[in-house]
Structures are given as structure tokens and as C-alpha cells.
Image: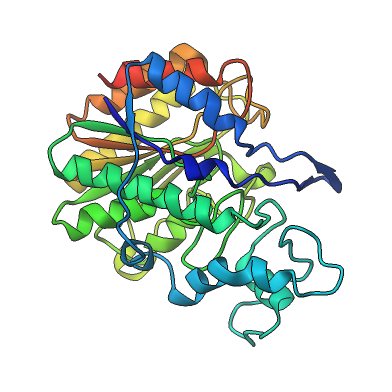
Amino acid sequence: MKAIFDDRQRLHDPQHFMANGKTYPSPESPERIVRLKAGAQAAGCRFEPPQDAGLAPLAAVHSAEYLRFLQNIHTRWQRIPDAGTEVIPNIHPANRRDNYPKSALGQAGYHQTDTSCPIGAHTWESAYWSAQSAIAGADLIFAGERAVYVLSRPPGHHAFTDLAGGFCFLNNSAIAAERLRKRGLRPAILDVDVHHGNGTQGIFYERDDVLTVSLHADPDRFYPFFWGGAQERGEGRGMGYNLNLPLPRGTDDAGYLAALDTALARIEAFGADAVVVALGLDAHIDDPFKGLAITTQGFQAMAQAIAGLGLPQVLVQEGGYVSDALADNLTAFLDGVS
């Protein structure tokens, strides 16, 4: 299987992560790349770097205002007296229909949903090449490959049109799906990350040309908290084109695979001719976030079920954090694809 990755994706190295009122080292560390790449190579993946497709595919999903913010906010932040090394907002608007401030601090609060997406000196560069990797994966599918693995890091599925959040800055899975759609395909996004793909949902929520499906731990007591309920089905033309399958905390392989059958049936009913799999491996029983209880063998069964659709797949890496099982989980999933 072909795989895509650019070494510049290692440069983003977030130093701050706040949870429950305490600051910890970020789980979204460059070490993830080492383990994921090893897992992919163990499954026979052959890595190549992406070409630069430019800003246009990013701007097809994200606003120009937001892209400009990501490009220059760290430089602007450093002009603040005694500023920290990373852009982390301490204020957010009550709603996003009021004033768009000129200050770096105000714009950070406007464009960053939480404290888990600090922006450092190299964040834009790494996020840009993570997105370019997803674009390259979509292009290979369009050219006839049946499955391509994209090691997108930083991940993307919590990023909205103009919002970063949850370690995510550019929505790689959405960018890949839009790339396929513009080339005449009818893509579905299947998000198997333990966290709801709230940014992906938001991007396509009022559209009927891309189906979005997410299986995830129930957000009532789990990130992202405010999105991911079964009642969220889309709006306007998008009504019925978003499917959320929230699962009880601790759901095991059997419960997950039963829900996956429902997801795959919806993709078939949509008439998709390509699938973007937002491949979170953080549903594993030993992942640091402890949301679900999928085993390594469960990931292989998951991949085999998705492959049963008979559709080309872009496998875009989302979550999956440092644990002894991370590489093995990816190997098992990729073995199940072929």
C-alpha cells in the first residue's frame, strides 16, 4: 500500500496541554510519527512525500480569514510584551456573530476553541504539510489506487471552517473529501476516532454532497462535549446527511462492530464511490484517553468490515496516542484493508 508523509510534519511540537485545571505534556507529540510510521511499514506501506498543491484545496474547506490567521498569528503573538512561546487564548466570544477584534489575543480566542491546540513557531508549516499529505492521498485514489494511508500529523477532524481545536488546525479528512468531490466522485467520510469529528460535521452540516458518519464515545461526559449526539442529523440541504453513533464508554469490539454495520449501511445507501476513513486509533483499550475498549484484533476486524464496501479508501490518520500498542494497532488495521 502506498503511504504519504512529509518530514516537516515533525516540526510542530506543542508544549502545553491543559486538562481538569492542570497542565500536562501534550499527548499529540512528534513521537506519534515514529510509532505510526513503524506500524505502517510493518504492514508493508511504502512512504513517499506529497507534492505541494498550494492553498486552493485548503481554501476550499477553510476561510481565507482563518488561513491568514494560522499563517501569521505566532509572529504577531511574539510582539505582545512577555508573551509565552505558544499562542493559547484566555478569552472566547460568547458567540461568533459579534465583533472580530484586531488584537492577536482576541483573534486567538475567536479561532481556537480550547487550550489543546497551542500554536507554536512551526505549527502552520506542519499543519500545511499534513493537509498536503491528505491531498496527495486523495489524488492517488482518483488516479486508481484502491487504498492509500496518509500519516497526517497534526490531525484534523476537530478543525472547523475557521476554528482550531483538539490538537487540530486544518481538517485533513474534509480537505481530502472535498478534493475527491471536486474531481467528480461522491465521497463519504467515516470517522472511527474515539472522539466525535465535530469539525468535519460542522464543515458539511448543511451540505448533501458529502456524507459524514462518526462513531465515538458518548460526548455527554467526553470531549468534545457539545457535539456528537444522535439527534444531530444535518440542517437544510444537509438534513439526513450526517450520522452520529455515540457509544457508551468502554464499548468493546462486539458493540463497536455492530454500530459499524449501521454506519456502513448508511454509506451504501448514500451511493458513495469513495471513502475517506478518519482513522483514529484512540478507541483502543490502552489509549491514554480511555474512551472505548477496542482491541488490536478489533481494529483488524473494523478494517475488514470497511473493506467489504468494495470502495477505494483514503485512510487519513487522526488520533491514536503514545502507548505500547499504537504501532501494532495501525499494522492490524492496515493488514485488514488488504
Q: Using residue 85 as the reference point, say whether residue 274 is left or right of it.
A: left
Q: Using residue 285 as the reference point, say whether residue 48 is left or right of it.
A: left
Q: Tell me the residue at 18%/34% (across/down).
A: 311
Q: Using residue 158 as the reference point, say whether residue 145 is left or right of it.
A: left
Q: Position of residue 108 (x, y in %)?
A: 67, 70
Q: Quadrant of the N terminus?
A: top left
Judge whether 97 appears above or below 317 on screen.
below
Q: Tell me the residue at 22%/24% (across/down).
A: 308
In this rendering, the count of numbered labels is 0
Q: Would you identify the image quadrant in which residue 218 lies? A: top right
Q: Tell me the residue at 55%/66% (across/down).
A: 70
Q: Tell me the residue at 64%/51% (across/down).
A: 225
- Res 21 seen here: yes
Judge whether 158 appears above or below 238 on screen.
above
Query: Which is more toward the observer, 170 or 261?
Result: 170
- Res 232 seen here: no
Q: Quadrant of the C terminus?
A: top left
Q: Using residue 16 as the reference point, say whether residue 33 is left or right of it.
A: left
Query: Which is more toward the observer, 175 or 190?
Result: 175
Judge whether 199 appears above or below 280 on screen.
below
Q: Position of residue 290 (x, y in %)?
A: 66, 28
Judge whether 133 appears above or below 300 on screen.
below
Q: Would you identify the image quadrant in which residue 317 lies? A: top left
Q: Position of residue 203 (x, y in %)?
A: 41, 62
